[in-house]
Image: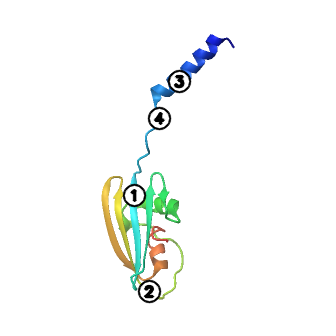
Amino acid sequence: MSMFGATSLAACAVMAVCTTGPAGPVTPDSSFVLTLTDARGGTTSVQLTCGPTQGNHPQGEAACRSLERADGDFTRLPVKNQACTMIYSPVLATASGNWHGTPVEFDTEYSNRCVADTHSGGVFSF
């Protein structure tokens, strides 16, 4: 390849990068702080971000799918098909954040952690 051809090719490559520019940061569609508090006051919290899925939720992909099915409405989360013990060990579940830019505040009490997981479609499975 001639020197002129290589220089032209390099200039074209640089121009393509310069005209399109680097991609900006991806802004998540939805983000929540989820908390479970037991009767003794012990609290566990995780961060869940959807669109793209990020954070430290152990089942983030499944939790985001459940939230998507419920359109971000925590009162309409799908119920998982799993059995839980009847042991009463209540937990307070809270969610604070936004769903596609709409502020969300939610809290409810479940009879135990398994029920919290089951009745939230895995959103409170941590």
Closer to us: 17 or 105:
17
User: Mark 2 belongs to which amino acid?
Assistant: Ser
Callout 4 crowding tier (Cα within 10 Å): few <14, some 14–19, many ≥20: few
Q: Residue furthest right?
A: 1
Q: Looking at the image, how many numbered discs can be counted on the residues?
A: 4
The image position of residue 69, as x and y in percent, is 44, 59
Mark 4 vs mark 1, foreground winner is 4
Write down the residue under mark 4: 22
Sequence-wise, which precedes: disc 4 or disc 3? Answer: 3
**Quarter where residue 45 is shown:** bottom left
Cα–Cα span, label 3 and label 2? 62 Å
The image position of residue 108, as x and y in percent, is 35, 75
Write down the residue under mark 2: 89
Which label number is shown at residue 31?
1
User: Mark 3 belongs to which amino acid?
Assistant: Val
Mark 3 vs mark 1, foreground winner is 3
Residue at 34% across / 58% down in the picture? 98
Sequence-wise, which precedes: disc 1 or disc 2? Answer: 1
SS class of the residue under badge 4? loop
- Disc 3 vs disc 2: Cβ atoms closer than 8 Å? no
Residue at 44% across / 61% down in the picture? 48
> Which quarter of the figure is the N terminus placed in?
top right
- Disc 4 vs disc 1: Cβ atoms closer than 8 Å? no
Sequence-wise, which precedes: disc 4 or disc 2? Answer: 4
